[in-house]
C-alpha cells in the first residue's frame, strides 16, 4: 500500500511520501528529448518499464559512476554478481522474460544511446538526470540509480531515495556543463557501449541445453562449491594433505571428505551415505584427522561387530598392522550398546565415570541403528534410563562441549523417511 502524498507539493522525489523519480521522468521526457544521466547502475527491467517513454527520445548519454559494474558485465566473467544488469529480487515471471527484454534494450542502445564509465572506482557517488527539450532544460539530482527500485517502479519495495528537482535555470545549465566536461575527459572516463551490448547479447541469446544443465547444477550446488573453496586453504594449512590417510584415499573419497568437513564446519552435522564398499571408514578417518589436527576431541561409536575395524587405528594401540601409525590417531572408541550402560568396562574405558560431554566431534558408524526415537525406560531398580538415542542426544551432544556429528550409513532409510528424520534430529 503506497503512502505517497500526491497533494504534497515539493521538489523532493523520494519514491515513498512524495512522487517518484519515474513520475518526474515520465512527465518531462518529450519527443526528441536529449538525456544525460549519471548512475551507478542501469538495468533492463527499468528500461522495460519506461520503454514507451524512452523510445521517444532523440538520444541518451549514460555515464556509469561505478566501473566495477561494467567489469562485472563482461560475458566471460563468472562473478555471481554479473547479472546486476537484470535487477535483483524480481519475480520469476520477469526473469523468464529477460531474453526479449534484453534484445529490445540492445536495439534501443544501438540506435540512441552512448555509454561511458569512470575509469576509477568511487569517483562519483551522486546521481543525475538531465533532460533537454529544445532549449528548455529539466533536471533532478540525488540518490536514485537507473533501476526498478531506484526509480520507484516497484509496487511493494521501491527504495526510499532522496532526490531534488533542480528548479534554477542557472543550476541546470551548470549541471549540463559539468556533465559535458566530465563526459569528454578521456583521462577520467572511457567508452563502454560495446561491453554493455556484449552483455545484453549474452542475456538475449539462446543457450545450448548442455549449458543450461551445467548452469542448473552450479546453482543447485553453489553453496557447497563456494564453501569448499573457502575451506580449501584451511585443509592445506593444517597439513591434512600430508597425512598417510589422505594419501590412501581415492579422488572421490577426497572430494567426499572435503564436502563432509565443509558441512560439519557450517552445519555441525552430516550424513555420509556412500554405498557398501566405497570406503566410508577411510573417508571418515580423514575427517577425524582434520579435527584432531585442530586439537579437537573425537569419539567414535560403532556396533560391537565393527569394533575391531576401528580399534586398529588409534596410536595408543601401537599395532604393527596399523598402516596409519604415523598419523597418531587419538580418538576414543566405544560401542553403540555402551550408551545403554552406566557402569562396567568397555575396551579399557570405565563407563561409571566416563565424561560423555567431552567431545567436539562424534562419529557414528551404522547410524541407521539410531533411527528410532524411543522414550526413557524404567530399570529394575526403578530408575528411568534414556534409550541409546535419547542418551546420545541429551547427554552426549546437547550437554557440555558444542558437538559436531558425522553419521555413516549405507542405508540411512530402512523403513520410512522417519528414519532419516530421526538421524538428522541428532544434530539439528
Image (cartoon, rainbow, N blue to C red):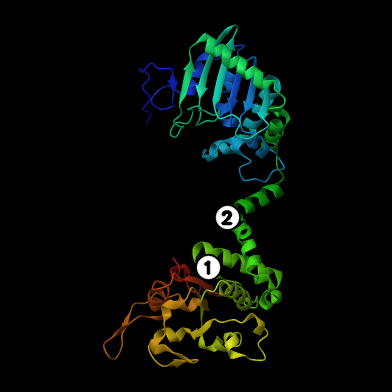
Quadrant of the image containing the C terminus: bottom left
Q: Is residue 378 left or right of residue 183?
A: left
Pick the front one: 135 or 89: 135
Tell me the tag on residue 270: 1
The correct choice, above or below, for 237 with respect to 206 in the image is below
Q: Residue at x 65, y 39 (%)?
A: 72
Residue 83, numbered circle: none
Location of residue 235 in the rendering, given as x and y in whole percent from the top left corner: 63, 66
Q: Quadrant of residue 48?
A: top right
Residue at (44, 77) in percent of width and height: 358
Residue 192 to residue 82: above or below: above
Disc nearer the start of the sequence (2/1) = 2
Residue named by callout 2: 223
Farthest residue, direction left = 382
Q: Can you say whether 208 is above or below 178 in the image?
A: below
Between the residue at mark 2 and the residue at mark 1, the CA separation in whole angstroms equals 15 Å
Quadrant including the N terminus: top left
Question: Percent from the top left, x then y, of residue 273?
Answer: 57, 71
Mark 1 falls on what kind of element?
Answer: strand
Q: Is residue 116 visible?
A: yes
How far from the left and from the top, in percent, is residue 281?
A: 61, 78
Graded by Cα atoms within 10 Å as few (under 14), some (14 to 19) or many (20 or more), the crowding at tag 2 reads few
Amino acid at each position: 500500500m503506497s503512502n505517497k502524498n500526491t497533494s504534497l507539493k515539493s521538489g523532493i522525489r523520494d519514491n515513498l511520501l512524495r512522487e517518484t523519480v519515474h513520475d518526474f521522468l515520465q512527465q518531462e521526457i518529450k519527443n526528441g528529448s536529449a538525456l544525460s544521466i549519471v548512475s551507478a547502475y542501469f538495468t533492463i527491467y527499468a528500461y522495460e518499464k519506461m520503454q514507451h517513454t524512452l523510445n521517444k527520445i532523440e538520444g541518451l548519454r549514460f555515464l556509469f559512476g561505478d566501473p566495477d559494474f561494467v567489469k562485472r558485465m563482461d560475458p566471460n566473467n563468472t562473478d555471481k554478481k554479473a547479472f546486476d544488469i537484470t535487477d535483483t529480487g524480481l519475480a520469476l515471471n520477469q526473469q523468464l522474460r529477460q531474453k526479449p527484454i534484453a534484445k529490445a534494450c540492445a536495439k534501443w542502445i544501438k540506435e540512441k544511446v552512448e555509454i561511458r564509465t569512470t575509469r576509477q572506482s568511487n569517483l562519483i557517488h551522486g546521481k543525475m538526470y538531465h533532460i533537454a527539450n529544445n532549449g528548455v532544460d529539466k533536471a533532478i539530482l540525488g540518490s536514485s540509480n537507473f533501476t526498478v527500485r531506484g526509480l520507484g517502479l516497484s509496487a511493494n519495495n521501491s527504495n526510499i531515495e532522496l532526490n531534488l528537482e533542480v528548479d534554477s535555470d542557472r543550476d541546470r545549465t551548470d549541471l549540463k556543463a559539468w556533465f559535458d566536461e566530465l563526459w569528454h575527459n578521456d583521462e577520467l572516463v572511457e567508452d563502454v557501449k560495446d561491453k554493455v551490448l556484449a552483455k545484453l547479447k549474452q542475456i538475449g541469446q539462446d543457450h545450448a541445453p548442455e549449458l543450461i544443465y551445467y548452469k542448473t547444477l552450479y546453482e543447485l550446488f553453489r553453496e557447497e562449491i563456494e564453501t569448499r573453496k573457502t575451506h580449501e586453504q584451511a585443509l592445506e594449512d593444517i597439513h591434512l594433505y600430508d597425512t598417510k590417510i589422505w594419501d590412501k584415499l581415492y579422488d572421490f573419497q577426497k572430494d567426499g571428505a572435503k564436502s563432509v568437513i565443509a558441512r560439519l564446519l557450517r552445519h555441525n552435522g552430516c550424513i555420509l551415505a556412500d554405498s557398501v564398499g566405497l570406503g566410508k571408514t577411510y573417508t571418515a578417518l580423514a575427517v577425524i584427522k582434520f579435527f584432531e589436527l585442530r586439537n579437537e576431541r573425537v569419539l567414535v561409536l560403532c556396533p560391537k561387530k565393527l569394533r575391531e575395524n576401528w580399534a586398529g587405528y588409534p596410536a595408543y594401540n601401537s599395532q604393527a598392522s596399523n598402516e596409519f601409525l604415523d598419523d597418531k590417531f587419538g580418538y576414543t572408541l566405544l560401542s553403540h550398546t555402551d550408551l545403554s550402560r552406566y557402569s562396567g568396562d568397555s575396551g579399557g574405558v570405565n563407563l561409571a565415570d566416563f565424561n560423555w560431554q567431552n567431545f567436539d566431534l562424534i562419529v557414528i558408524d551404522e547410524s541407521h541403528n539410531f533411527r528410532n526415537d524411543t522414550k526413557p525406560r524404567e530399570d529394575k531398580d526403578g530408575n528411568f534410563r534414556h534409550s541409546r538415542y535419547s542418551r546420545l542426544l541429551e547427554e552426549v551432544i546437547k550437554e557440555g562441549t558444542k558437538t559436531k556429528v558425522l553419521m555413516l550409513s549405507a542405508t540411512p532409510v530402512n523403513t520410512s523417511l522417519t528414519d532419516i528424520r530421526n538421524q538428522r534430529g541428532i544434530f539439528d
